[in-house]
Image: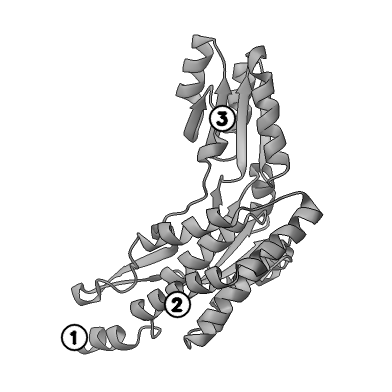
Amino acid sequence: MKQIIEKIKNDIYNFSSKKVQNIIEDFQKEFGYNTSKLVDAVNKDYERYNFKMRIDELEKIFEEENKSPILITEKIDEKIIIDGIGTVVVIYNGRPEVTLRMILKGLKTHNKIILCDKNNLKINKVLVDMAKKVISKNNYYIDVINITDRYDDIYSSQEMIDKIIYIGNKCDYIELRKRLYIDTEYNGYGYIALFCDDDEKEKNVQNIQLYCLTNFFDIDVFYNDIDNAIAHINYLAYNETTVIFSKNKENLIKFMLNVKSDKIYINKNPLPEYKFNISDEKLIRRKQI
């Protein structure tokens, strides 16, 4: 048994935490060197979609991801293998922060990440090309990161996929789920459910709707009938972010107690704090030897 564990320790997929850390550091440098290329891609996406991503917001993601440790094979001497789950397909609306974070998480968790960008944004292609350049330079597996806009192909390729993460609209996720037999997870980033029975807050609601419209976010707005709103919000899947604008204490309490949501914003715009994340733990597999 000891010989088997030692062999696994030495050559388990040739994964090297140090090499991955070097790749991430080089990727961050490459990102900094190519600001003009990133800005050019952002401007092209703006011309096409009226959507503009802030480069400084993407830079922060490197800092955030660097704070969390690389978990893979850390406890092999304790007869525990910690490894990635394999090939992970991410279907999303193209938000670049999702692209960058999933590239970094894929590297850190030893997974092959296939990004299915439904809007085919230029900046996402630039980010993936940067990552591939650095990965190749470090003699790592070049195919660990890929991007496509043909996400319908996953239906005929399910036997080669270990997990699908769907980010965004709940109804679209349910329709997709009907045709899949593999492990699928819903992430509510990019979908906001909002209830309002306060006419004075209508301007706030309109501003949130406008922002969502130009930033590839989906939003459902419900007015006045609190029971109907809760029923619709709780239908299909768990919510990440819900919002209520109301002065009615009864409605506020009913909403807080009954809505299935990770975060509930009360008389407050959620967008300044809105951020995509997914736990590394959801991308790894632990095996007891």
**In the rendering, at what x and y percent does residue 117 appear?**
68, 61
| Residue 67, quarter of picture | bottom left
Look at the numbered disc 1 and give the secondary structure of its residue: helix
Look at the numbered disc 2 and give the secondary structure of its residue: helix
Residue receiving disc 3: 269
Q: Is residue 87 left or right of residue 6?
A: right
User: Residue at left 52%, top 46%?
Assistant: 275
Distance from the alpha carbon under mark 3 to that under mark 1? 56 Å
* N-term mark: 2 or 3: 2
Q: Badge 1 local density, few (<14 within 10 Å), some, or many (20+)?
A: few
**In the rendering, at what x and y percent does residue 43 appear?**
73, 58
Mark 1 against mark 2, which lies toward the viewer?
2
User: Residue at left 54%, top 10%?
Assistant: 248
* N-term mark: 1 or 2: 1
Q: Badge 2 local density, few (<14 within 10 Å), some, or many (20+)?
A: many
Rendered image: mark on residue 2: 1
**In the rendering, at what x and y percent does residue 232 appear?**
63, 29
* N-term mark: 3 or 1: 1
Residue receiving disc 2: 23
